[in-house]
Image (tube, rainbow, N blue to C red):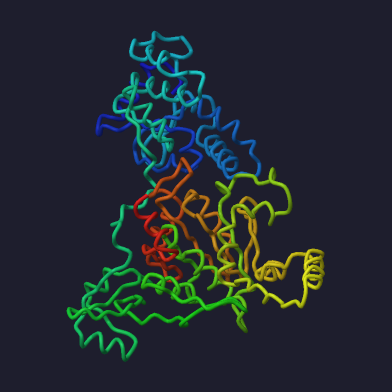
Amino acid sequence: MMESSSGALGRESQRSSTRKAKTYVLDTNVLLHDPHCVFKFDDNSLVIPIEALEELDAIKMEQSSERGRNARRVHRLLRELLPDSRAMLEGVRLKSGGTLSVVINKYLQGTEAIPSRVKALGSILNLEKKDNRIIATALFVQENFPPPAILVTKDVNMQLKARAVGLEAEDYLNDKAPEEPEDQSYRRIGVSKYDLQRFASEGEFALSEDEGASLALNEYALLETEEGKTMPARHYGDGLVRKLSFPDSVKAPGGIPIRPRNLEQRFFLDALMDDSISLITCYGKAGTGKTLLSTVAAIQQSTVANSSYDGVSITRPVIGVGKEIGFLPGSLEEKMNPWLQPYYDALEVLLPCTPPKEPQFENKRQRKKAKDVAEAVEPMQKPYQRLLDSRLVEIEALCFIRGRSIARRFFILDEAQQLTPHEVKTVITRISEGSKIVLIGDPAQIDNPYVDSRSNGLVYCANRMRGQSLFAHVTLTKGERSPLAELAADLL
């Protein structure tokens, strides 16, 4: 579609004869977010601005980053779909029924008269910036193609700028999870007191057909009677619910026992301790126990006799999978230390350092001599250091995970809400048989500008995996760190 606008209009009119198709202009970040997005717009028309190809050309040189790989995927895909200059000029029809075109903004070339509305754009936006040139190209499409023309971008600020100049703009919605009730962390199911007594004695109970159909496999629920009696349960499929099965407490070797403090933590610990579940997702605000429970459960299961796991692997996004950490000094562990400090804090809680008893001295001379000796001795190691030295607990960097096969490890991925769906898929597909992966995070706290509370990798994974036999999901809502932390999380 690089010919005259009249030719483009003719083809668009033919396509619109039976249904008024929309024309979507794709921003670069949408192509990077999902390289196969061009197949997910049904029979609507897709337009890629030439500026997007220019941005992809610069990003493709990022050899070790996910963005670089996705840019190269897009280039290969477009080369297959648009194999020659004729296809580039006229566009191609996709299997979905829509069309794909690459467009040059003839207004910016100066080859066509610029409408006054578009001409005013230059005094509003700096057209030296690629984002603003893409907005200008979308306006060109809006003026020369059958309406409606819509800019699709993951950049919220770009959406706002586009709307400010009279252009429809929206987010890429294909991988967004449906909205969920904020106050519902688990299902409540009413039963009679006799059924609850039978459940307590037999350990399992068959729900009615309607109630069973409403629960997903491995979904947690609370059985309750009209008298206020309750018991937690897990759905094992076909309406059958069973009691939770986990030890009264868990602990690291030589550490203090940790017990769940509320019902949601009991759900989480049940999933963590079940070898039949290979993938767990957990939402929770700050202080709900996500990090502490997952860490202690992982260490205990990796240190018991005949353990299924050889150790624990811990990681979190530095910002994203593709971000480099080479500029930080030191070894991999030292580079990752600032990002993994929450896990060191958790290990401090699990393996507290008990200071030695203060010795008694007969005189000041003995006290001074003991002090001189103590200063000459190296500082005492943290109790958890032996776990790191023995490689029982390992620090992983996400930017180096591609191509690996992680076997017999209990893998914890923190801050998973910062990742895109494709990045989470990259991590999970590295997990070999015999391993377990736990994705934890808070969908309400996202720093990545290209994902939100419904399109991030953590929420996307929980939504797509729901009902699978190897998967369980838990939401933690009650803070247990301290009354102050709980108050701050709720009010600030």
Query: Residue pushed farthest left?
Result: 226
Q: Position of residue 425 (x, y in %)?
A: 51, 55
Q: Residue at position x 47%, y 18% from top?
A: 126
**Foreground residue, 105 or 264?**
264
Image spot of residue 44 (x, y percent): 34, 35
Q: Is residue 402 visible?
A: no
Q: Which one is nearer the viewer's eye here, 379 or 270?
A: 379
* 44 over 483 or under it: above or below: above
Q: Which quadrant of the structure image shows residue 132?
A: top left
Where does the image place residue 221, in percent across and percent down from the top left?
31, 73
In the image, is 367 to the left or to the right of 11?
A: right
Vertical arrangement, residue 196 with respect to residue 447, above or below: below
Q: Is residue 398 in sight in this rendering?
A: yes
> What residue sits 60% from the left and 31% below the top?
58
Answer above or below: position of 169 versus 482. Answer: above
Q: Residue at x 72, y 68 (%)?
A: 380
Give the quarter of the figure containing the N terminus.
top left
Is 22 left or right of 62, judged from the image as shown?
Answer: left
The one nearer the camera, 24 or 263, is 263
